[in-house]
Image (cartoon, rainbow, N blue to C red):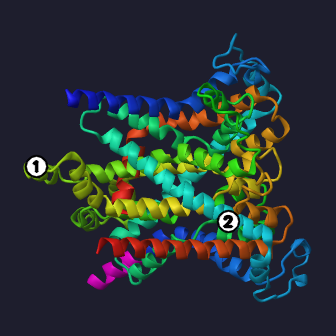
Amino acid sequence: MKGWVERQQSRAAWAFLSPALLLLGLFFFLPVVAGLALSVTDFDIYAIGDFSTVRFVGLRNYVQAFTNPVFGTALRNTFYFVLVGGPLSVFTSLGAALLVNAPLVRFRTFFRTVFFAPVVTTLVAVAIVWRYLYHPSYGLLNLALGKVGIHPIDWLGDPHWAMPSLILLAVWKNFGYNMLIFLAGLQSIPEELYEASRLDGATAAGRFRHITLPSLGPTFLFVAVMTMIGHFQLFAEPYVMTQGGPLKSTTSVVLLMYQEGFKWWRLGMASAFAFILFMIMLAATWIQMRLQRAEAS
Amino acid sequence: MRRGFGRILLHVALVVGAILTLTPLLWMISASFMATGEANSLPPRLLPHSPTLEHYVALFARLDLSRYLFNSALNATLVTTLSLCINGLAGYAFAKLRFGGRDRVFRTLMAALVIPAQVGMLPLFLFLKYLGLVNTTWGVIIPGMCSIFGIFMIRQYALGIPDELLDAARMDGAGELRIFRTVVLPLLKPILVTLAVFTFLGTWNDFLWPLIILSDDARYTLPVALANLVGEHVGDTELMMAGSVLTILPVMVLFLVLQRSYIQGVMAGSVKG
């Protein structure tokens, strides 16, 4: 009897899982493995019509990627976006969460909703909006800076300013998401901890350093890793706002992969780009987790 | 005294932050009602001199915006419905059904969460090309029809369903599918609503994959159409702003209506994840 029930349940379970496993297998796992295979071939526009022209080239694509100056630039730009934009975004989120969570705040839900609003907007649409906000002569940003005596900046036209402009847009667009996660972390800190330290005569700054920050540790790791992973995938902002320019200063790895793959149809090379980025993301995640663990102990 | 001052400072910071956050969106709305060329005048204008709907009319009459709206709505609805069913069944099975290999399969899926979608996109494109699905609705929605993250969210939630409830239903002779439909689904409703909002917004806003798989502008989604439009009409600031408003408006309304479950979902996902 028992065996029959178990068999019954096991059959049902596999039936319930089969649509998901079939879809993931065919349209996720298979392409990932195929991508690895593709990256060691010279798959190009001719191969799309005739598979037999594909040759195994070993690690040639990877070697060429690292000697290709444009890929080097794309890697540098992506790291710029990750290393400057990521922390900026995380600290803006933390600041917003601390403000919204402060004990004396009125209209807390209103502010939370306002700060979260950019998160639900469509990236392509707001990137277009910001393109106009950054306009050197008609844009609101230069208008506002002009009021305090700062000369107009050619935000998207100057290779030095283009990446900071994309970072500013990304911070605006995303900080609300991590703010919510920090809020969840802040609200899960037991009130008794604060009360006890208040009785011990700790100052507000001391409570922040010794209770709030350490308690947020796991949240911080989660936010930092997720933000970093998201930032490595920079694509729509440069695609819509700068097409990777000026002077390739905003060409990201994913944008280059898109151009290499779907503009020039060099799918072998593009797959190598994708895998290099993936390996970098894995290594960066591992390093970040190690660092935080070392700090915690 | 000091306390009162701090309180004012706190609210000043919040109000300034709110104004900075809303300015791009408010300017977008304002500029979309300006006459052609008005947004590019010196000194820059903040409000339309005499508000006009001409750009909205032009988008629908000349630029086929209703088609893109329809495509986006169709794709997002299909992905949301299908993925909820597929992820729901799988998430529940991982949480509550006993079968050999459960933990191993689940661990494999969790490990695969670190693989970014871009890694498989190029072969997936080729694969769908040979299946004849490039430039079709199926081609756009296939990668979204099942998500490991969705399965994970539902599993975490379904772990809280008491086994006695399921066993009682089994005693009554109900089959597993019927138990899922009549007992489990109602209990999963909160997480399903949250995931529905997540998925709908995510699909609506998605850009890279639709851009890759769609080549014919009759099938474009709003973001792809908009990115295409800005190439030809970059000078028409007001027109582009009207297009941006129409792209953002549906998801913004959906978010405002369902924000409680959405916000709770984000916060819950982070604490457990």
Q: Give amino acid for label 1.
A: Gly
Identify the image quadrant of the C terminus of chain B: bottom left
Depth order, front residue of B15/B22 = B15
Q: Give amino acid for label 2.
A: Arg
Please, which chain is the residue tagged with disc 2 on? A
Any part of residue B131 in sight: no
Circle 1 SS class: loop
- Give percent across and percent down for residue A31: 67, 74
The question of residue A173 being in magenta is answered with no
**Res A76 label:** 2
Dominant SS in magenta: helix
Depth order, front residue of B5/A163 = B5
- Is A140 situated above or below B179? above
- Give percent across and percent down for residue B234: 81, 35
- The residue identified by callout 1 is A201
- Magenta stretch: give its range: A1-11
